[in-house]
Amino acid sequence: MNPETVTKVGSWERLLDQIPHFLATNGLKLVAAILIYVIGKWVAKLVAGLLRKLLNKSKLDATLVTFVSNIVYALILTFVIIAAIGKLGVQTTSLVAIVGAAGLAVGMALQGSLSNFASGVMLILFKPFKVGDKITAAGTTGIVQEIGIFHTTIITSDNTKIIVPNSPIAGGAITNFSAMPTRRIELSVSVPGASDMAKVSGILQSILEADERILKDPAPAIVISSATPGEIVFGVYPHVNNEEMAAVQASLNEQIKLRLTAEGIWT
């Protein structure tokens, strides 16, 4: 047996000889530390579970519920571990300072992410829009596919997937096209200045009356927006159910073109 092996064996023997002495002098502290860890971990799970149930009853987003409950569990478990280490006689002041400094460093590094997280919580809590709504936010227009903790996913009209950070959404104006059950279509119809205004108004009115999708209450409006010797501009304002707006608007544009052309008003 070479000298190095002999030295290692001797070191292990001395270590094993010290174990009974360590247990005799620190056994109660070790047992207390283990109990603190076991009971503390159980309490952390219990609190996190109760918080998860409470948040679920509030009908919050499942992702937010999981994230918050996991954060609470991790924080409680951190304090439990520090308390268990302190019970063994280890000075935990420096450890607490290190944990605090590490948390501050992580917070500074993730400042942008934390801002998006806070904005995501606000969007989920106050619900200025929901999944399936058509919105314009942070310069993007489309259908909301997902509202996440850190970002919102929007599908545009050309089927492009855009992931927008929550911070600029929550910090800016949000236009929700799906929030109201009905919408008003706003059409501008120009005809030559020499046209018979009563005739044009009657044609437009008959087009609106022929479309059953146009609501009777509130009643559609036809007004003269402007009139000059060379041009008369009619404003056509029917109300429709929100989900039918695009189809009705396209249909009205087609019908107006066909009727005014057939009547000789448009050439």
Image (cartoon, helix red, strand yellow):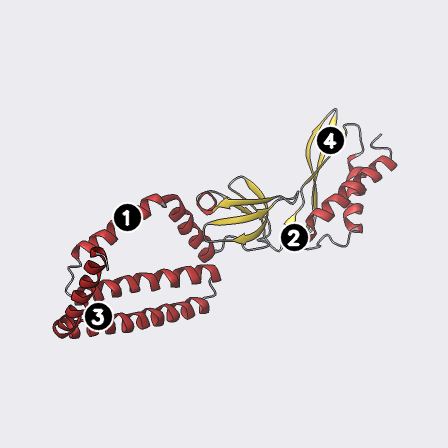
Q: Nearer the viewer, residue 196 or 82?
A: 82
Mark pair 3, 4: CA separation: 88 Å
Residue 115 location, x and y as percent? 39, 47
Q: Secondary structure at mark 1?
A: helix
What's the amino acid at mark 3? Ala
Mark with earlier residue (3, 4) = 3
Q: Please name which of the two marks, 3 or 4, marks the residue nearer to the observer.
A: 3
Check disc 2 and report its element: helix, strand or loop: helix
Q: Is the residue under label 3 in contact with that under label 1 (CB below 8 Å)?
A: no
Q: For residue 104, which numbered disc appears in the image? A: 1
* Residue under the point 43% across and 62% down: 66
Whichever of labels 1 and 2 marks the residue nearer the N terminus, that label is 1
Q: Which residue is denoted by mark 4 in the rendering?
A: 232
What type is the residue that disc 4 sits on? Ile
Q: Amino acid at mark 2?
A: Asn
Mark 1 or mark 3, earlier in chain: 3
User: Which residue is drawn at the image coordinates 21% and 74% (left, top)?
Assistant: 31
Q: Which mark is residue 33?
A: 3
Q: Secondary structure at mark 4?
A: strand
The residue beneath circle 2 is 242
Q: In terms of sequence position, does the residue under pointer 4 or pointer 2 come before the other?
A: 4
| x and y, in percent, of residue 221 in the image | 69, 45
Give the answer, above or below, for where 240 lies relative to 196.
Answer: below
Q: Residue furthest top?
A: 230
Drawn side of residue 97 relative to residue 44, left or right: left
Separation of disc 4 and disc 2 at Cα? Answer: 29 Å
The numbered mark, 2 or 3, whose residue comes first in the sequence reads 3
